């Protein structure tokens, strides 16, 4: 492990969580210093104050005019769908059948899963995403491939094997019992190994029987610090289907809640068409939402009501939902999140956009004691954004009158070209110039 590193540059982060975006503080340290020891932040402040604290022989990376922000956190993404990103066609249920399921069938092949896992992890890092909550496929091989690739980079990744015992092609189905046994074996192998964490992953209510959901609940009880990820209230046809399949339940979320699958480490993707009772239950169970703007627009699912989530004090993280989502980049995702809010006469500040992509995501994943800003003691995941990455950005950046304006333009106009460097646990794992082409 690398021992020590000093980073000099211009830093931006959100020091504290807040439900009311008006109270979010955007902290700017113009000539700052971050000290890292064994992957953790040991000191953060101004260069003038800290220069004397740099240990002898500690390398200093001077990042010049780059803007250093905490590593981005993607709270919902599908690793096996990277290869079908941008597939033309209809809404959720047709898209699943035509693109997602056929792609996922390939991941029973271990070599293929390993190859695609490397691609996926590299793509995250190229886009400045250092932590993600990830759907694999129904095959344990896909989970092994992803965790192995993430472990090589020492990334904090939460992932799990999809549970799906009905309403999908036969080659993608497990059974309630095999899903339980395979999940249990993967939990024993990977959960809390280094920075890796396991998430129980029932795909969504229509593809699991009550028996399977009950067994997932049993695992969650057995290992209380496990995560849970699934989909909720994304699309109106999906919701009607859930009502048909589970007529005995009060609403869609009640299907999960009934089996003990809500809670502070439970993350529900989308949540566009929620009933009042579902909002209340997300709040009382301290469950979190993954807001997936590019996916919601691409699949025509609807507009997520972030304002409502804030009022209800429900935790929200930002997410790409690749391959329903159209970009790996959290910068493009903040761009689309802004527009989703605009269409509802709501607004996002630059500070809240950065919050959603960093500390807010960490909070949604119950990792805000470890990730999300530059507080000493946290894990040293951070990225350097280049406000001059393209001619257009460079011209626009020069016109910015404040650092908020500069950050906002980056989060609207930026993409992977703006991510100059990515550091994971204090180690440089991606540098843009080093890329061919
Ligand atoms: N609902 C169930 N499965 C999926 C999926 O793979 N993508 C999205 N966007 N929604 C889902
Ligand atoms: Zn999804």
Image (spheres, rainbow, N blue to C red):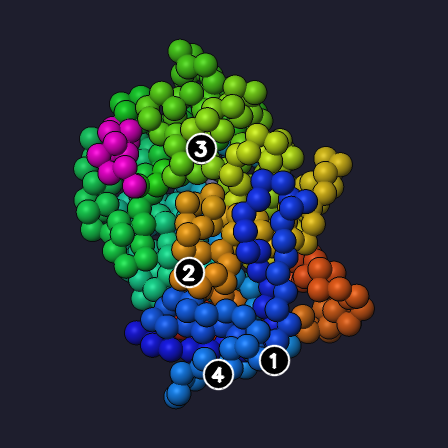
Which residue is rendered at x = 28% and y = 45% of the image?
A: 139
Q: In which quarter of the image is residue 19?
A: top right
Which residue is rendered at x = 74% and y = 69% of the image?
A: 397
Q: Would you name the residue on which mark 4 appears? A: 52
Q: Would you name the residue on which mark 3 appears? A: 286
State the residue lying farthest toward the bottom: 57
Q: Does the magenta stretch include residue 115?
A: no
Question: Real-space Cα distance between discs 3 and 4?
Answer: 44 Å
* Mark earlier in primary sequence (3, 4): 4
* Mark earlier in primary sequence (3, 2): 3
The local crowd at label 2, few if under 14, some if 14 to 19, many if 20 or more residues have their Cα within 10 Å, is many
Q: Where is residue 206 in the image (x, y as percent from the top left)?
A: 41, 26
* Mark earlier in primary sequence (4, 2): 4
Question: Real-space Cα distance between discs 4 and 2?
Answer: 22 Å
- In depth, the one of 141 and 356 nearer the eye is 356
- Disc 1 under 8 Å from ligand 2? The reply is no
SS for tag 4? Answer: helix
Question: Of the residues tagged 4 and 2, which is closer to the observer?
Answer: 4
Circle number at residue 378: 2
């Amino acid at each position: 492990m690398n021992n020590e590193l000093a980073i000099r540059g211009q830093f931006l982060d959100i020091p504290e969580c807040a439900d009311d975006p008006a109270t979010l503080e955007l902290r700017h340290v113009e000539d700052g210093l971050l000290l890292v020891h064994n992957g953790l932040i040991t000191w953060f402040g101004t260069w003038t104050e800290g220069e004397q604290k740099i240990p002898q022989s500690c390398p200093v990376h001077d990042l010049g005019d780059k803007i250093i922000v905490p590593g981005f956190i993607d709270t919902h993404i599908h690793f096996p769908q990277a290869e079908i990103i941008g597939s033309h066609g209809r809404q959720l249920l047709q898209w699943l059948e035509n693109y997602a399921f056929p792609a996922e069938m390939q991941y029973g092949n271990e070599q293929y899963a390993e190859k695609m896992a490397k691609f996926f992890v590299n793509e995250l890092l190229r886009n400045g995403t250092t932590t993600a909550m990830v759907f694999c496929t129904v095959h344990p091989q896909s989970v092994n491939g992803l965790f192995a690739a993430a472990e090589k980079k020492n990334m904090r990744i939460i992932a799990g094997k999809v549970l799906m015992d009905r309403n999908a092609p036969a080659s993608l189905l497990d059974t309630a019992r095999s899903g339980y046994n395979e999940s249990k074996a993967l939990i024993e192998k990977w959960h809390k190994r280094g920075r890796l964490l396991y998430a129980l992953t029932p795909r969504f209510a229509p593809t699991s029987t009550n028996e399977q959901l009950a067994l997932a609940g049993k695992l969650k009880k057995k290992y209380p610090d496990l995560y849970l990820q699934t989909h909720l209230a994304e699309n109106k046809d999906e919701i009607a289907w859930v009502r048909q399949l589970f007529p005995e339940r009060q609403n869609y979320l009640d299907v999960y809640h009934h089996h003990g699958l809500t809670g502070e480490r439970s993350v529900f993707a989308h949540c566009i068409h929620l009933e009042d009772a579902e909002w209340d239950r997300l709040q009382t169970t301290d469950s979190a939402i993954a807001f997936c703007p590019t996916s919601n627009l691409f699949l025509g699912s609807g507009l997520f009501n972030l304002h409502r989530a804030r009022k209800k004090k429900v935790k929200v993280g930002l997410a790409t939902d690749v391959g329903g989502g159209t970009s790996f980049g959290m910068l493009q995702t903040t761009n689309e999140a802004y527009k989703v809010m605009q269409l509802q006469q709501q607004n996002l500040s630059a500070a809240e956009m950065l919050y959603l992509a960093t500390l807010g995501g960490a909070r949604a994943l119950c990792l805000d004691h470890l990730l999300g800003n530059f507080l000493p003691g946290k894990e040293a995941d951070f990225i350097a954004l280049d406000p001059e990455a393209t001619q257009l950005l460079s011209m626009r950046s020069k016109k910015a009158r404040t650092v908020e304006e500069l950050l906002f333009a980056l989060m609207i106009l930026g993409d992977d070209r703006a991510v100059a460097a990515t550091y994971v646990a204090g180690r440089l794992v991606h540098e843009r110039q080093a890329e061919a082409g």
